[in-house]
């Protein structure tokens, strides 16, 4: 508005004052008014651009890459109470495996996606949303690769492989004799089985011997009382052997161990 006021003063100058001076007519006023409006709009536009540039960018929820979590356990692999390790499968032992897909730390709904399970390259299970599978273990003397695939997952095909360690059955002799030295002429020992395809350890058949001679067992077949002759010299060695066998299993069905003791 200041420019317009100045222009109006120039319009009413006296003719004498106009001499040698360019007149400021109405056309000049219109032009200046137009320029002023253009300048104001340009200024407003600049402010708007600055405001947009300074505004924070919109927040978009970020989705992390899916995380595949696989787990497994042997359904019938015996371990004694208190054992803190993993029960390892023997040949033919049934194994249960499961899959969880986590997105942003939460389980994803897999019901609409085809899931494939492979053991050592062979298909052992498949189906829509199949997150669990049960199969028989292979040879206990080798490591078994278990692979799961979800080829049609929206963010891209999912695949993961874990490795299952098998084991042959084992039997451990428990004897309360430090340094494997026993006094007297009688020994009490207990056999503890591991990794047999059983639930109850009494399902096994135990055989005991001392220096190759069959020994009598107690009412509990897992235990044995070994008696040696009274004339056995001090320092004599006694080899105790226990054999445990699963009569209902064809493969990986037995284990034996021998410990050398010294009579004092």
Image (spheres, helix red, strand yellow):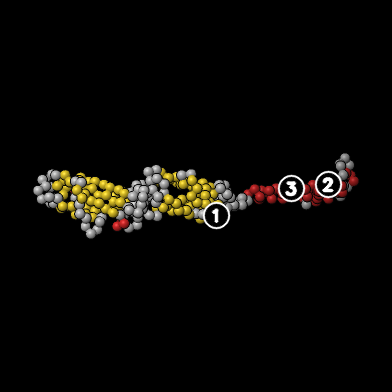
Mark 3 lies on residue: 42
Q: Earlier in the sequence, mark 1 or mark 3?
A: 3
* Mark 1 vs mark 3: in front: 1
Mark 1 lies on residue: 128
Residue 78 locus on image (x, y percent): 34, 54
Residue 31 locus on image (x, y percent): 83, 47
Residue sitting at x 88%, y 40%:
20
Residue sitting at x 53%, y 53%:
127
Residue 129 locus on image (x, y percent): 53, 55
Residue 263 locus on image (x, y percent): 14, 47
Q: Earlier in the sequence, mark 1 or mark 2?
A: 2
Q: Which mark is residue 31?
A: 2
Q: Earlier in the sequence, mark 2 or mark 3?
A: 2
| Residue that extends furthest to the top in the rendered view of this protein | 20
Tell which of 33 and 179 is nearer to you. Answer: 179
Number of residues whose C-alpha sits closer than 10 Å to that of mark 2, classed few (under 14), some (14–19) or many (20 or more): few
Q: Is residue 236 left or right of residue 251?
A: left
């Amino acid at each position: 508005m200041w420019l317009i006021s100045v222009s109006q003063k120039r319009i009413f100058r006296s003719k004498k004052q106009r001499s040698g001076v360019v007149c400021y007519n109405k056309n000049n006023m219109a032009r200046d008014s137009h320029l002023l409006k253009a300048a104001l709009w340009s200024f407003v536009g600049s402010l708007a651009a600055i405001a947009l540039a300074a505004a924070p960018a919109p927040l978009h929820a970020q989705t992390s890459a899916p995380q595949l979590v696989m787990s497994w356990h042997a359904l019938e692999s015996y371990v004694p109470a208190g054992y803190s390790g993993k029960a390892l499968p023997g040949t033919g032992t049934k194994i249960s495996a499961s899959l969880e897909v986590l997105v942003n730390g939460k389980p994803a709904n897999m019901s609409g996606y085809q899931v494939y399970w492979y053991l050592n390259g062979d298909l052992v299970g498949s189906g829509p949303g199949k997150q669990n599978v049960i199969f028989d273990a292979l040879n206990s003397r080798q490591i078994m690769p278990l692979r799961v695939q979800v080829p049609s997952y929206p963010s891209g095909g999912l695949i993961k492989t874990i490795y299952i360690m098998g084991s042959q059955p084992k039997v451990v002799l428990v004897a309360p004799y430090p340094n494997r030295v026993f006094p007297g002429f009688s020994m009490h020992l207990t056999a503890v089985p591991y990794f047999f395809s059983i639930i109850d350890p009494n399902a096994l058949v135990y055989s005991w011997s001392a220096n190759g001679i069959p020994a009598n067992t107690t009412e509990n077949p897992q235990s044995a009382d070994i008696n040696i002759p009274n004339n056995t010299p001090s320092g004599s060695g006694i080899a105790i052997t226990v054999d445990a066998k699963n009569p209902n299993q064809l493969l990986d069905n037995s284990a034996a161990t021998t410990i050398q003791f010294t009579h004092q």
